[in-house]
């Protein structure tokens, strides 16, 4: 005679719940190829945008900076916040966090037929510039938050020890990095006009962009009137 124990209903239910949650989290992330094919508008002056946000918010690893740009790529509002270590890399959680920050710093544009402002996300993290599942969750969250706030979804940028990288575009540079001391906004303009930008193929291209956004007050949130 063989004796055995049937798994309890509670154990089976818990295992199914964990499995379903993992599947759902994987569905709430975007891979670089999906992001590149989504029609995300290219930044004219990515170094300028990155340097300006780095100077304003002084991000450290696990800090996200969400910024809203007008049609001329001028900064309209921005906010920075730390990712909670207890929260898994879930696009739904990231979407809610981004949406909460956007609602605090700028009115929605849901009444417009087409978006006129663009939201970009700079995320400072450990590791190198290669895409991670966490990046995929931030991409999903940014896209969804933009839809719910009436904004155009813009670039997703990582800031690591090696520098900054616009994921899905292959553009990046060594400065600023997560180890850099924030420069004054006037210094960031001068550096932008002389420093090269890396392209996806490893070539170096000198970029001289539009005027840098008007300096905002040194506060955590920086909406303009």
Image (spheres, rainbow, N blue to C red):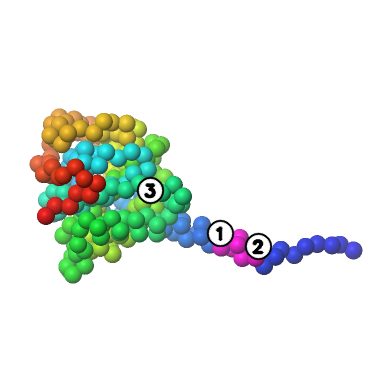
Residue drawn 20% across the image and 32% down it: 183
Question: Mark 3 or mark 1, which has the lower sequence index?
Answer: 1
Give the image location of residue 167, x and y in percent.
32, 45
Q: Which residue is mark 1?
A: 18
Q: Residues within 10 Å of mark 1 (few under 14, many from 20)?
A: few
- Quadrant for the N terminus, please: bottom right
Give the extent of the magenta segment. 10-18
**Up-down relation of residue 194 to residue 225 (above or below):** above
Residue drawn 11% across the image and 55% down it: 225
Q: Which one is nearer the viewer's eye here, 89 or 183?
A: 183
Magenta run includes residue 16: yes
Q: Residues within 10 Å of mark 2 (few under 14, many from 20)?
A: few
Q: Which one is nearer the viewer's eye here, 156 or 185?
A: 185
- What element does badge 2 sit on? helix
- Residue 129, quarter of picture: top left
- Left or right of 11? Residue 36 is left
Q: Which one is nearer the viewer's eye here, 129 or 117?
A: 117
Disc assigned to residue 83: 3
Instruction: Name the chief secondary structure element in magenta.
Output: helix
Question: Mark 2 or mark 3, which has the lower sequence index?
Answer: 2
Q: Residues within 10 Å of mark 3 (few under 14, many from 20)?
A: some
CA separation in Å, label 2 and label 1:
11 Å
Instruction: Answer whether residue 54 is visible to the viewer in this image.
Output: yes
- Which tag is nearer the camera, tag 2 or tag 3? 3
Disc assigned to residue 11: 2
Residue drawn 25% across the image and 50% down it: 79
């Amino acid at each position: 005679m063989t004796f055995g124990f049937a798994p309890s209903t509670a154990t089976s239910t818990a295992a199914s719940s964990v499995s379903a949650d993992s599947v759902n989290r994987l569905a709430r992330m975007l891979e670089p190829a999906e992001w590149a094919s989504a029609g995300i508008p290219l930044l004219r002056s990515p170094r300028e945008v990155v340097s300006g946000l780095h100077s304003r918010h002084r991000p450290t690893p696990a800090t996200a900076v969400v910024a809203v740009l007008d049609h001329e790529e001028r900064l309209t509002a921005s906010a920075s916040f730390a990712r909670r270590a207890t929260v898994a890399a879930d696009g739904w959680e990231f979407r809610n966090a981004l949406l909460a920050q956007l609602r605090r710093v700028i009115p929605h544009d849901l009444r417009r037929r087409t978006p006129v402002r663009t939201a970009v996300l700079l995320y400072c993290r450990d590791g190198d510039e290669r895409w991670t599942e966490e990046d995929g969750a931030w991409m999903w969250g940014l896209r969804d938050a933009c839809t719910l706030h009436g904004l155009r979804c813009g670039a997703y940028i990582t800031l690591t020890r090696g520098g900054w990288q616009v994921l899905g575009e292959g553009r990046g540079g060594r400065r600023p990095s997560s180890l850099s001391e924030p420069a004054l906004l006037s210094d960031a303009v001068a550096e932008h006009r002389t420093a090269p930008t890396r392209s996806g193929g490893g070539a170096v291209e000198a970029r001289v962009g539009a005027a840098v956004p008007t300096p905002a007050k040194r506060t955590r949130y920086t909406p303009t009137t």
